[in-house]
Image (spheres, helix red, strand yellow):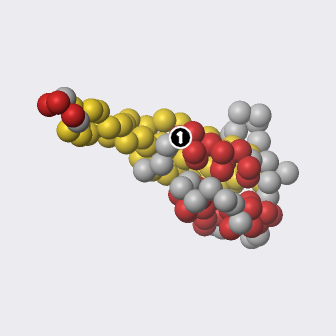
Amino acid sequence: MASVTKTLTNDGREIRGKSLARFVRCSARKARYVVDAIRGKTAGEALEILQFNQRPSAVPYVRRSLLAAIASAREVHPHPESLIIGEAIVNDAPMIKRIRPAAMGRAVRIRKRQCHIQIALVEE
């Protein structure tokens, strides 16, 4: 008989829905500003905050990840919009490196930064 393991957050709460967006074409620093604004809020409140957020670079990626977490929570919870964002983590991903020609025959490195966005929904 297979045992069912529960996934828990760092503070011991059971995760109801989660999502992980990998290799997002936005720097981790810009995405962290957006994620910090929604951490600890309910999923419904977080969607409203993201709708009116003034940082356009990271909002579509964080919103998409939050909607994916809500969709995965819909399987086990009847009203996933009432769940709380228990874990919201933004980590660096490998950079895409390009070379651009510069003056006097030199070359300049261009670093296109990426990040991983992880969101987990928990009950109160």
Residue 38 as seen in the image, left or right of residue 59: right
> Is 4 rendered above or below residue 69?
above
Residue 80 visible to an observer of this rendering = no
At horizontal 27% and vertical 32% (from top left) the residue drawn is 108
> Is 45 rendered above or below residue 89?
below
Q: Which residue, as the protein is rendered here, is positioned at the far right? A: 124
Secondary-structure class at tag 1: helix
At horizontal 49% and vertical 43% (from top left) the residue drawn is 27
Instruction: Give the residue type that dot 1 points to.
Output: Ala
The image position of residue 87, as x and y in percent, is: 69, 43
At horizontal 53% and vertical 37% (from top left) the residue drawn is 91
The image position of residue 53, as x and y in percent, is: 69, 60
Pointer 1 residue: 28
The image position of residue 89, as x and y in percent, is: 62, 41
> Is 75 rendered above or below residue 62?
below
At horizontal 17% and vertical 30% (from top left) the residue drawn is 104
Q: Nearer the viewer, residue 35 or 56?
A: 56
Q: Quadrant of residue 105?
A: top left
Q: Nearer the viewer, residue 12 or 87?
A: 87
Q: Which residue, as the protein is rendered here, is positioned at the far left? A: 105
Q: Quadrant of residue 7?
A: top right
Classed neighbour count for the residue bearing mark 1: other residues with Cα under 10 Å, few (<14), some (14–19), many (≥20)? many
Quadrant assignment for the N terminus = top right
